[in-house]
């Protein structure tokens, strides 16, 4: 039992901050697992022209690669807390990085290393669970977003017809109120695809 508990702790830590060979494996595993909600999230961005996109918790860089192929996107920046997983994202996007279309940054969502009003879109897929300080992170997202810009935060809130009370409470009592208090408007909670039996939702808002 102690071994199983220890293994569970290790795996949970790897999903939060992947490291080493196991972290690289988990990063690639998440690319495959999260493909439906990744593509759905990109659709929600409603890309127009001359877009500059920031992804928080970019993982192994699959969304960055898809965004880099879109002519409407001038630049896409991926940020992650894990140096190991950024290495995977660099390999996946090496050509786009050479062209200057993709940039990767090691950093913490609580203190974004970017100028004010730099991005037209800010997105996150399955990383919000690991944000230690939601109020501070939401303020940072608002700060780096251009007027008229959009944020999309994608996560799962249930599985196999069972609603996750803790996650839904976080959405209703923390995420939605904080996003509204930040000054963002047209705040919507949208229901997305079921992926591997998990229900996907996204919070969308505009500045």
Image (spheres, grey):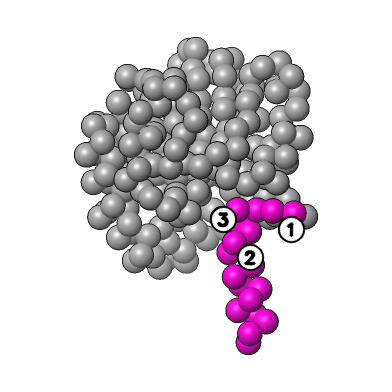
Q: Which mark is residue 11?
A: 2
Does 142 appear in magenta? no
Q: Quadrant of residue 87?
A: top right
Q: Position of residue 59 (x, y in %)?
A: 62, 43
**Relative to 9, does residue 200 appear above or below in the rendering?**
above
Which is more N-terminal, label 1 or label 3? Answer: 3
Write down the region rendered in magenta.
Answer: 1-20
Measured in 3D between alpha carbons, the distance from the residue under mark 3 to the one under mark 1, in whole angstroms, is 12 Å
The residue that appears at 50% across and 48% down in the rendered structure is 127
Asked if residue 90 can be seen in this view, the reply is: yes
Whichever of callouts 3 and 2 sits on the residue coming sooner in the sequence is 2
| Residue 58 in sight from this viewpoint | no
Report the disc number at residue 22. Answer: 1
Say how many tags the image has: 3
Query: Residue 16 bears which disc, if any?
Result: 3
Q: Residues within 10 Å of mark 2 (few under 14, many from 20)?
A: some
Look at the image and tell me in which quarter the N terminus lies.
bottom right
Is disc 2 placed on a helix, strand or loop?
Answer: helix
């Amino acid at each position: 039992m102690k071994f199983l508990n220890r293994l569970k702790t290790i795996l949970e830590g790897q999903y939060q901050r992947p490291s080493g060979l196991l972290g690289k494996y988990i990063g690639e595993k998440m690319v495959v697992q999260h493909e439906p909600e990744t593509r759905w999230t990109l659709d929600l961005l409603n890309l127009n022209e001359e877009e500059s996109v920031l992804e928080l918790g970019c993982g192994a860089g699959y969304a960055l690669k898809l965004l880099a192929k879109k002519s409407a996107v001038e630049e896409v920046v991926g940020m992650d807390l894990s140096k190991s997983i950024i290495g995977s994202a660099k390999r996946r996007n090496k050509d786009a990085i050479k062209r200057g279309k993709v940039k990767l940054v090691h950093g913490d969502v609580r203190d974004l290393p970017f100028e004010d009003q730099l991005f037209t879109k800010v997105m996150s897929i399955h990383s919000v669970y690991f944000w230690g300080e939601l109020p501070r992170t939401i303020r940072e997202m608002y700060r780096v977003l251009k007027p008229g810009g959009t944020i999309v935060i994608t996560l799962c809130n249930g599985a196999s017809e069972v609603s996750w009370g803790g996650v839904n409470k976080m959405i209703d009592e923390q995420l939605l109120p904080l996003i509204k208090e930040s000054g963002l408007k047209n705040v919507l909670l949208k229901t997305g695809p079921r992926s591997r039996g998990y229900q996907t939702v996204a919070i969308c808002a505009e500045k």
